[in-house]
Amino acid sequence: MAKALIQMALDSLDFDQTLALAEQVAPYVDILEVGTPCIKYNGLEIVTALKTKFPNNLILVDLKTMDAGEYEATPFYEAGADICTVLGVSDKATMGGVIKAANANNAEAQIDLISVRDKKAVATEAAKNGAQIIGVHTGLDAQAAGQTPFADLQAIASLNLGVRISVAGGLNKDTIQKTIQAGATIVVVGAAIYGAPSPAESAKELRALVDAA
Ligand SMILES: O=C([C@H](O)CO)[C@H](O)[C@H](O)COP(=O)(O)O
């Protein structure tokens, strides 16, 4: 089985701080995620900057697209995004548009199941329509209300859809291995790295845990 990938969520609004944090963690993570607040604040320029400075990392742009999928995602793929996200609550045509844009740029589309009611149905349909990654995601607001992504992960993993499963939602050193063992092939970490006294040390520790899982 291929090793799981680690994705670091860069959720700062500040352009320079985002690049500085990426510099610290890039050696230990596979994917650098431009988080939704960050991409809304900084736009295409930060994608270009990250792609140029970190050619050995994949770049995920967490667009959380809700409409005009192909139109919205295309410039981000053209700027160097390897993966863009589109909301699973969006229209089938919107998800299809992002998948089309991904394929046109030799890249990938991730369907984010945040706030989707029937997660199994949406994930099944998305995989059938060519999405490469399904994102099981407990957002920051839902985390604050005490929710976790683990039950949803179990439900999606049980479908054996043959696509990669990304999991986000407050993962840390105590939960990352069990997340992989439950079926995640991409583990997303934000606060547990950027909120640590040393983000580089935290990322290094998580890398070791993921490699040993
Ligand atoms: O995607 C995220 C959130 O919805 C804000 O856009 C976070 O980046 C994601 O949840 C990972 O961060 P942590 O939950 O802090 O690990």
Image (cartoon, rainbow, N blue to C red):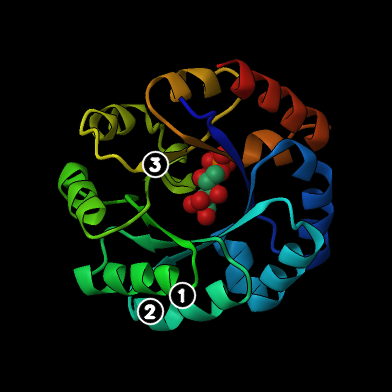
Q: Secondary structure at mark 3?
A: strand
Residue 14 seen in render: no
Quadrant of the image for the C terminus? top right
Q: Earlier in the sequence, mark 2 or mark 3?
A: 2
| Image quarter of residue 179 | top left
76 vs 184: above or below: below
Q: Within 10 Å of the Cα at label 3, are there few (<14), some (14-19), or many (20+) other Cα atoms? A: many
Which of these two is toward me, 10 or 163? 163
Q: Secondary structure at mark 1?
A: helix
Mark 1 and mark 2: Cα distance apart in space: 5 Å
**Residue 164 placement (x, y as % from top left):** 39, 41
Q: Which mark is residue 164?
A: 3
Q: Are marks 1 and 3 in contact (CB under 8 Å)?
A: no
Q: Badges 1 and 2: C-beta atoms under 8 Å apart?
A: yes
Closer to viewer: mark 1 or mark 3: 3
| Quadrant of res 79 | bottom right
Q: How many marks?
A: 3
